[in-house]
Amino acid sequence: MAFTSFLRWKLIFILSFCFILPGFAQIYRPKPVTALLGAMDEEIELLRQTLQKPKVKVIHGITFYEGKIGRQRIVIVKTGIGKVNATMTAAFLLQTFRPQRVIFTGIAGGIHPDLNPGDIVIGQQTMQYDFGQFTNEGLQTGKTRNPINRELNPLFFPADSLLLITAQAAAQTTEFKKMENQAKAPRIITGTIVTGDLFVTSETKVNELRRRFNADATEMEGAAVAQLCWQQQVPCLILRSMSDKADSKARESVDNFKKTASYNSARLLINMLSKLPD
């Protein structure tokens, strides 16, 4: 009888441990590291130039750069263009370096009618406009689902409040480059950034994104990384400088303005780092 009771309690303990263990496996334990991501070389060029005592680490063919910017421990990586590339790289990043915060920097197409190349959108929220179902009425954008808790994610992923406030403060003291033939300094707004695996070069699509989502800018990575960070409870912010207006002249505009736009977004980010806690 005593032996049977012992086996019963041992079985209860083992089953309880099995149920509890998956929950513990999902706990993210951050380190005092800030991760800086960009999709293209131009978007991380200034960050790499500013990095002190850089070290290189290659993971599954992806090159990560470790070092310091000011007081902050930093890891920098180029994700490649598109949602899959960005999320894959960000997943390697979180697993290996365990950053306490993630900031994505780079260029975007302006959707807000008052934005011009060189202007900046600090992403208060981001969303994926090309996720959902396609019906006879067209694409019905929907929410993604968190595979960890099986709950629906928000349609719009909110930026971390501390990162958002810090970026807004840093924007007031950052010296930006002016675009050629533009007398005024870049305009900075806080707004909505929408993400899709499409390079938008269409006035029709611009009007649609503005009407349906009140979008201010569009790009190809941010909301996918924001979703990963949301599901792992890692603070995240998306910063974008306009290289074009996402219209029929967007390709030519990107070629002309991407270098300066990339610089301005990275310049804001570097100033922002000086204002963040260690």
Image (cartoon, rainbow, N blue to C red):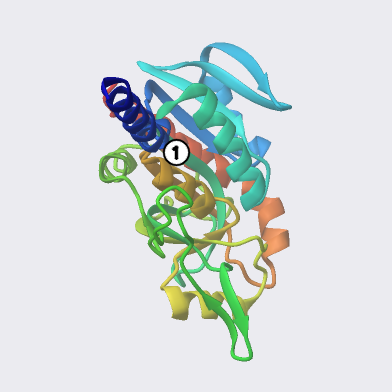
* Image quadrant assignment for residue 164: top left
Q: Residues within 10 Å of mark 1 (few under 14, many from 20)?
A: many
Give the image location of residue 3, x and y in percent: 32, 20
Q: Residue at x 62, y 52 (%)?
A: 83
Query: x, y percentage for residue 153?
Result: 40, 59
Q: Is residue 81 above or below residue 57?
A: below
Residue at x-position 51% and y-position 74% = 141
Instruction: Evaluate whether residue 47 shows in this view.
Output: no
162 or 234: nearer the viewer? 234
Q: At 63% across and 38% down in the image, what residue appears?
A: 79
Q: Quadrant of the C terminus?
A: top left
Q: Taking 251 as reference, is 6 above or below it?
A: above
- Quarter-of-image position of residue 184: bottom left
Quadrant hosting residue 26: top left
Which residue, given by chain and number where applicable, does mark 1 sit on? Answer: 103
Is 168 situated left or right of 221 in this image? left
> Which residue type does callout 1 highlight?
Ile
**Residue furthest toward the bottom?**
136
Callout 1 secondary element? strand
Asked if residue 63 lies left or right of residue 123, the reply is right
Q: Is residue 187 left or right of residue 78?
A: left
Question: What count of labels does the image hold?
Answer: 1
Q: Is residue 167 left or right of residue 103?
A: left
Q: Nearer the viewer, residue 254 or 163?
A: 163
From the image, which quarter does the N terminus lie in? top left
Q: Is residue 16 visible?
A: yes
